[in-house]
Structures are given as C-alpha cells and as structure tokens.
Amino acid sequence: MADVEFKTEHRISEIMKSLGMRSDDVRQVYYAFDKLVILKKHMPESYRAKNYVTFSIGKEEYMERMTWINDFMRSHGMTENVFRDVTDFETSCEDYDYYNEYKTPTQYRQEETQRNS
C-alpha cells in the first residue's frame, strides 16, 4: 500500500500557534482571510476571471484587508508579510494559497523550497 499523506492545517495556523496568539486573535485572522476568498487559486478559470474583475473593482477594500493581515501578523511577531504585493491579483492569490490552503507536509516543503529560492 502506498504511503498516504494526510492534509495538515493551514500554514497560517501553524504560524499563529508558534507565535502564541490568543484564540480571539486567531479568529480575527481567519475572518480576514474569509473575506479574501476571491483570491483562492484553485477554482474554475471562469471564476478566476470574474474574481480578477471583482478584485480590480474593489481593489482598495481588498488591499486594506491584506494590509491589515500583514500589520496584524507583524504586530504579533511574524517577520515577513503574508501578502507580498497587495496591489497585484496574481501575487496575492499565490500568497493566499501559500498561507491559507490546506497542504500536505511534502507540499509545504516543496513550496517553501520554491518560494525561498
């Protein structure tokens, strides 16, 4: 039987645990991510196109939310920004996926290697 990897928690969950964030703080971060669901990468192409238009129209609001997450996480001890470029839809989608989607341990390692190279 092949080795099966089970999904892990969101990367952001592991980071929040390591920072010792209170449950209320964790809830706030998840709520902020929920408001950015249009950044979800793994959707049918027709949805992604609509999400791009939605992002473009409401860019200020989405940028505000991503900036809030960055500032909030930094204020709790995270040393890098969650969202590297809040003005760019594709980069923001990559970051949303990197931090907020469920991944296996192997996927984590592969993504970290790719992202840090």
Image (cartoon, rainbow, N blue to C red):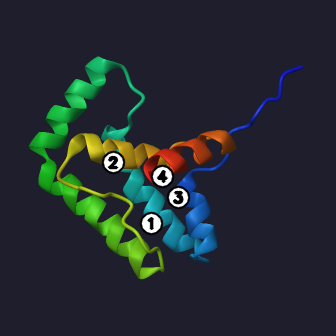
Which residue is labeled 3 in the image? 12
Q: Residue at x 52, y 58 (%)?
A: 12
Q: Nearer the viewer, mark 1 or mark 3?
A: 3
Q: Residue at x 57, y 50 (%)?
A: 10
- Label placed on residue 36: 2
Q: Position of residue 69 (x, y in %)?
A: 36, 65
Disc on the earlier residue, 1 or 4: 1
Q: Nearer the viewer, residue 71 or 26?
A: 71
Q: Position of residue 114 (x, y in %)?
A: 48, 45
- Mark 4 and mark 1 in contact (Cβ < 8 Å)? no
Q: Position of residue 55 (x, y in %)?
A: 18, 42
What distance separates the C-alpha of mark 4 from that of mark 2? 12 Å
- Mark 3 and mark 1 in contact (Cβ < 8 Å)? no
Disc on the earlier residue, 4 or 3: 3
Disc on the earlier residue, 4 or 2: 2
What distance separates the C-alpha of mark 3 from that of mark 2? 14 Å
Which residue is labeled 4 in the image? 99
Which residue type does callout 3 highlight?
Answer: Ile
Which residue type does callout 4 highlight?
Answer: Tyr
Quadrant of res 28: bottom left
What distance separates the C-alpha of mark 1 from that of mark 3? 12 Å
Which residue type does callout 2 highlight?
Answer: Leu
Quadrant of res 46: top left
Which residue type does callout 1 highlight?
Answer: Gln
Q: Residue at x 17, y 52 (%)?
A: 87
Which residue is labeled 1 in the image? 28
Quadrant of res 21: bottom right
Q: Secondary structure at mark 2?
A: loop
12 vs 54: above or below? below
Residue lying at the far right in this picture: please name it: 1
